[in-house]
Image (spheres, grey):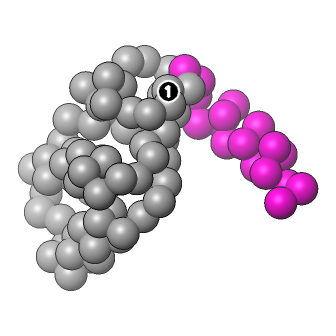
Amino acid sequence: MWFGEMLPEVEFGHAVAHSQNCDLMLLIGTSGIVYPAAGLPQLALSRGATVVEINPQETDLSDRADLVWRSTAATALPALLQALAPF
C-alpha cells in the first residue's frame, strides 16, 4: 500500500473483525500513524486483546501496547519463532 491509497474494503473489513476477536495482536515494524489501519490496535485493546509492539523506535502506539520489544523485525522474529518452536 502507498500513502493515500485506499485500502481494499472487503479485506479491511476482515481486519476489523479479526481485531475485534483476537487474543493477541503483534505490531511489527509499523509507524502506527496511517489511518484507518492505525486504529486496529486500539480496537483490539478495547476488546481485551494483548497488544505487543516490535519496533526499534517508539511509536504513537508504544504507550498503549501491553509489551514493547525494541528490536528490528529481522532480529525479533527469528528469536520469537525459536522461542515458540517447542510449542
| Residue extent of the magenta highlight | 70-87
70 relative to 46 in the view: left or right: right
The quarter of the rendered structure image containing the N terminus is bottom left
Question: Residue 2 at x, y = what percent?
Answer: 22, 51
| Residue drawn at point x = 20 percent, y = 35 percent | 33
Rendered location of residue 60, percent (x, y): 25, 26
What residue occupies the far right of the structure in this picture? 86
Quadrant for residue 32, please give it.
Answer: top left
Q: Amino acid at mark 1?
A: Val
| Residue at image point 49% right, 54% down | 24
> How many marks are shown on the rendered structure?
1
Residue 55 located left or right of residue 17: right
Q: In the picture shown, does residue 60 fall above or below 11?
A: above
State the residue position of label 1. Answer: 68
Does the magenta portion include 52?
no
Q: Position of residue 27 (x, y in %)?
A: 44, 43
Q: Is residue 83 magenta?
A: yes
Q: Secondary structure at mark 1?
A: strand
